[in-house]
Amino acid sequence: MNKTNLTALPPEESLADLAHFAWCALVGLRLAQQDGQAFSPLTIHTFLLRWLVGAQKQRRFPRSVAVDIDSLLRLGRQKGLAAGLSSRLEYIWHSWHGAGISAVGFVPADACD
């Protein structure tokens, strides 16, 4: 009988993972906007929903973020534009960034692929 030892991440690491996730989503959105896409509220919402689905299916982020991805997807699908996905992601990023945690060396170059 093989038991897997699942230990919870320290809160700082979980918060850093969540902030990294939000940062990647926002960078993806800004890159899409530079390509001439996702300018209206509807296209921003649609882009973020598709990005979240891709992140979930490809398991791009640690397990500590999976629940948040699920919650944002559910919220975005249920409330539509009123979910304010972009605002929520910006809030997550700014909450972490404003906590005084250094972002130096935080994101590897291929982290959001």
Image (spheres, rainbow, N blue to C red):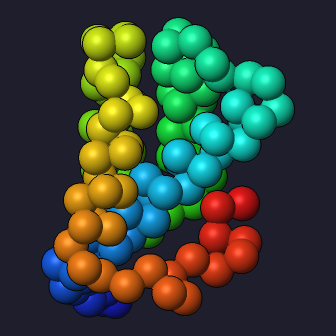
Identified at 64% across, 61% down, the residue is: 112
Give left or right: position of 37 versus 27.
Answer: right
Q: Residue at x 72, y 43 (%)?
A: 31
Q: Say if 62 sits above or below 36 in the image.
A: below
Left or right side of 26 for 87: left
**Relative vertical location of residue 33 with respect to residue 12 in this rendering, above or below:** above
Q: Residue 25 placed where, x, y %?
A: 53, 47
Q: Residue at x 72, y 72 (%)?
A: 110
> Where does the image place residue 23, in percent across and percent down from the top left?
49, 57
Q: Is residue 59 left or right of residue 65?
A: right
Quarter residue 44 falls in: top right
Compared to residue 3, the image places residue 39 above or below, namely above
What is the quadrant of the N terminus in the image?
Answer: bottom left
Residue extending farthest right: 35
Residue 72: horizontal and vertical position, in percent?
Answer: 33, 35
Relative placement, left or right, of 45 versus 78 is right
Quadrant of the frame with the C terminus: bottom right
Q: Is residue 36 visible?
A: yes
Total number of numbered discs in the rendering: 0
Residue 24: % across, % down: 55, 55
Residue at point 50%, 87% (across, down)? 104
- Residue 8 visible here: no
